[in-house]
Image (cartoon, rainbow, N blue to C red):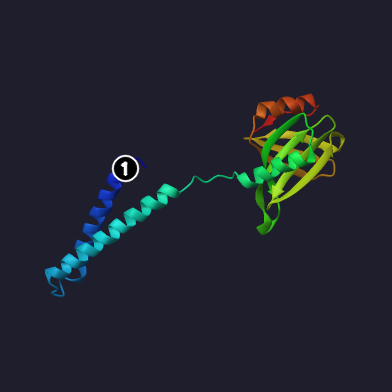
Amino acid sequence: MDKKTNIVFYLLCLGGGLLFGLVFFLAFGADKGFTWDLALICLIGGLFFAVAFCVVWLIVEKFSKPFTFENPKAQRMLLEYEKSQSISFQHKFCAHFLNCGKGLKQELCETFIYFDEEKVRIVFCHFYRIYSYEFPYSSIKDMRIEGYKTFIISHCDGASMVFSIKDSLNDLKELLLLKGFDAQFIK
């Protein structure tokens, strides 16, 4: 939040604390014959909790990060694996592997998809372990782009792998056409 919004939020919390203290005293203390000293204690208690809430909210909001599926540690591990294996490729795409694992072991995995002259190589990091698969183009039944950044590779044996591409889909479409696959965008 910006400075003006923080001030408005702080004043709203103070007003809420004052209102809470007054309502609390009128609801529970006035009909029982409590003194105005107790009303002041209720008011101070309401203000204390309002200020505490505001301060905690501002501290938590300051350190909060936006939610993302990116995993920097897995990305570093994949880059180190690429260097250690001296992977040669013509084109490389970054993606998330969507159908990796079952049940509690299911996650979105950081993935690199390498296209070479004769094969597709898929390297992904699943729970900080590196897995690699190579598929010759002859064993691939279909490669297609569906919907919004969804890339599907279907094997001749009926299995398929689904990825969410992070890079440019136009580059992938051109590459699929070059390799002889139908690169229609299916919606």
| Left or right of 118 in this view: 125 | left
**Among the 4 quarters of the image, the one containing residue 115:** top right
State the quadrant of the N terminus. Answer: top left
- Which residue was labeled with disc 1? 5
In the depicted view, which residue is nearer to us: 52 or 187?
Answer: 52
Q: Answer above or below: position of 95 versus 28.
A: above
The residue at the point 41 percent across, 52 percent down is 60
Q: Position of residue 162 (x, y in %)?
A: 71, 42
Q: Furthest-front residue in view? A: 84
The answer to which quarter of the image holds residue 148 is: top right
Q: Residue at x 24, y 59 (%)?
A: 47
How packed is label 1: few (under 14 Cα within 10 Å), some, or many (20 or more)? few
Please give the name of the residue rendered at 19% of the width and 62% of the height, measured from the top-left corner: 22
Query: What is the secondary structure assignment of the residue under circle 1?
Result: helix
Q: Nearer the viewer, residue 104 or 78?
A: 78
Q: Is residue 184 visible?
A: no
Residue occupying the point 72% across, 24% down:
174
The front one of 120 and 131 is: 131
| Residue in front for this viewpoint, 76 or 95 | 76
- Residue 166 lies, with reference to residue 42, above or below; the image says above
Q: Where is residue 171 shown, x and y percent of the image?
A: 69, 26
* Image spot of residue 68 (x, y percent): 55, 44
For residue 146, say whether it is visible: yes
